[in-house]
C-alpha cells in the first residue's frame, strides 16, 4: 500500500480556516474570559485574510489533492473565494460595536433555560458568547471543502462539518429565546432528513458505479455500466439533499422559521455562504458525475428554478410574522397562569 500524496500548498486555504477554528477552541478553553473576544477577533480575521490570499495565489492551478479526494480548479477556487469574502463581511458585522463586545445579538448563556435565573445572571454580568467564532470558522471550512470535494464521501463529510455548527448557531439569539431554540431544532431535524437523502443517493450511486469518485461515476454513467433506473433514483435523492441547502422550492419550508429565529448575523451568513457552497457542490456533481444524465436533470432544475422565483415573489406578498404571533400567544398564555 503506497502512502497517499497530500498537496499541502493546494489545501492551504482550508487548512488555514480549520487551524484557526481549532485554535479558537483552545482559546475558549484556556484564555481568561475578558481576553477572549479580541483574541478570537484577531485570530479569525487573520485566518480569513490569509486563506483569501492563498486562494488568490492558487488561481490558475488545476489538479487533484489528497489522492484525488479534493479538486483544485477554477470553479472550486472561485466558490471558496466568495465564501471567504462573505465570512469577512460577517466578521466585520460582529466587530461593528466593540464597546459591547460585538456579540450583543447572541445569548450570554446558551445552555440556560429562557427566562431562568442563570440567564438573567449571565445577562447582568454582560457575558458574551465568544464560542461563536470557532463555530463559524468550522462552518466556513466545511463550506470551502463542500464544492471542492471530488468524491461523495468527502462531500458528505463536508456537508456535516458545516451543518452541525450552523444548527448550534441558529439557537443562540439573545432575544426571543424560545423561537431561536425552535428554529435550531427545526433546522437540525430537517437538515438530518436532507443529509439522509444525500447519503442514500450516494450509496446508490456507489452501487451503480462501484466507486465514490465523481469522475468514476461520470465514466460509468457514460458507459452505461449498470441499471439506468438506479442512477436516476440516486440522482434524485442527491438532488434533494443539495436543493434543501439551497432552499429551493419545494424544500424551502424551513427557511422562514430558521431565518427569523436565528441571530441576525447568522441569518445573513447562512443566506449567502450556505447557498454559495451548495451551488458549487451542485455544479460539481451534475457536470462531473452526472453529465450523461443531463437530459433528465436539466428540465428538473429549470422547473425548480422557475417555481422558486415565482413562489418567492408570490408568497412574499402574503407573508405574515407567524413567529411573532406565536410568541405573543405564548406570553399571553404564561401571563395568565
Image (cartoon, rainbow, N blue to C red):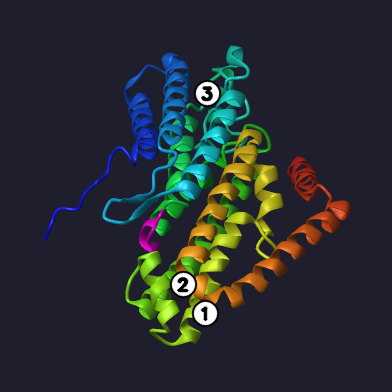
Q: Is residue 278 magenta?
A: no
Q: Nearer the viewer, mark 3 or mark 1?
A: 1
Circle number at residue 201: 2
Circle number at residue 250: none
**How many marks on residues?**
3
Report crowding for label 2: few under 14, some 14 to 19, many 20 or more residues within 10 A (C-alpha): many
Q: Residue furthest top?
A: 99
Instruction: Judge whether 197 appears above or below 332 on screen.
Output: below
Residues at circles 2 and 1 in contact by the CB criterion of under 8 Å: yes
Give the residues drawn in magenta, as a range.
149-154
> Label 3: which residue?
128
Mark before the other along the chain sequence, 3 or 1: 3
Q: From mark 3 to mark 1, how far is it between C-alphas?
A: 47 Å
Instruction: Judge whether 283 appears above or below 236 on screen.
Output: above
Instruction: Judge whether 4 appears above or below 168 on screen.
Output: below
Q: Residue furthest front?
A: 60
- Quarter of the picture containing the N terminus is bottom left
Residues at circles 3 and 1 in contact by the CB criterion of under 8 Å: no
Please state which of residues 191 and 141 is positioned toward the viewer in this rendering.
141
Residue 67 image offset from top left, x and y in percent: 26, 55
Mark before the other along the chain sequence, 2 or 1: 2
Q: What residue sits 32% from the left and 22% below the top?
A: 30
Q: What residue sits 76% from the left and 40% below the top?
A: 335
Q: What residue sits 43% from the left and 19% below the top?
A: 36
Q: Residue furthest right?
A: 317
Please state which of residues 253 and 145 is positioned toward the viewer in this rendering.
145
Left or right: where does residue 120 sit relative to residue 252?
left
Residue 41 image offset from top left, x and y in percent: 48, 21
Q: From mark 2 to mark 3, how far is it between C-alphas?
A: 41 Å
Circle number at residue 233: 1
Amino acid at each position: 500500500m503506497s502512502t497517499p500524496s497530500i498537496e499541502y500548498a493546494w489545501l492551504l486555504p482550508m487548512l488555514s480556516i480549520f487551524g484557526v477554528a481549532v485554535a479558537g477552541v483552545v482559546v475558549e478553553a484556556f484564555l481568561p474570559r475578558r481576553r477572549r473576544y479580541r483574541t478570537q477577533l484577531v485570530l479569525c480575521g487573520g485566518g480569513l485574510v490569509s486563506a483569501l490570499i492563498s486562494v488568490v495565489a492558487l488561481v490558475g492551478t488545476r489538479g487533484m489533492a489528497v489522492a484525488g479526494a479534493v479538486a483544485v480548479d477554477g470553479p472550486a477556487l472561485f466558490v471558496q473565494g466568495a465564501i471567504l469574502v462573505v465570512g469577512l463581511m460577517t466578521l466585520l458585522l460582529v466587530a461593528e460595536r466593540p464597546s459591547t463586545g460585538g456579540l450583543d445579538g447572541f445569548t450570554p448563556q446558551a445552555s440556560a433555560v429562557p427566562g431562568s435565573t442563570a440567564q438573567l445572571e449571565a445577562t447582568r454580568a454582560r457575558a458574551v458568547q465568544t464560542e461563536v467564532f470557532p463555530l463559524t470558522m468550522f462552518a466556513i471550512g466545511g463550506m470551502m471543502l463542500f464544492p471542492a470535494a471530488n468524491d461523495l464521501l468527502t462531500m458528505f463529510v463536508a456537508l456535516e462539518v458545516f451543518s452541525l455548527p450552523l444548527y448550534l448557531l441558529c439557537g443562540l439569539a439573545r432575544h426571543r429565546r424560545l423561537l431561536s431554540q425552535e428554529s435550531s431544532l427545526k433546522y437540525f431535524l430537517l437538515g438530518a432528513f436532507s443529509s439522509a437523502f444525500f447519503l442514500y443517493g450516494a450509496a446508490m450511486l456507489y452501487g451503480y458505479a462501484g466507486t465514490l469518485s465523481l469522475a468514476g461515476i461520470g465514466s460509468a454513467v457514460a458507459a452505461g455500466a449498470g441499471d439506468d433506473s438506479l442512477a436516476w433514483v440516486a440522482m434524485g435523492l442527491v438532488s434533494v439533499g443539495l436543493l434543501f441547502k439551497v432552499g429551493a422550492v419545494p424544500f424551502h419550508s424551513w427557511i422562514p422559521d430558521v431565518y427569523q429565529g436565528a441571530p441576525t448575523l447568522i441569518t445573513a451568513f447562512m443566506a449567502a455562504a450556505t447557498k454559495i457552497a451548495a451551488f458549487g457542490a451542485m455544479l460539481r456533481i451534475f457536470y462531473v458525475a452526472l453529465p450523461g444524465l443531463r437530459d433528465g436533470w436539466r428540465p428538473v432544475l429549470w422547473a425548480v428554478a422557475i417555481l422558486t422565483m415565482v413562489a418567492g415573489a408570490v408568497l412574499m406578498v402574503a407573508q405574515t410574522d407567524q413567529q411573532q404571533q406565536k410568541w405573543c400567544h405564548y406570553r399571553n398564555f404564561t401571563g395568565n397562569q
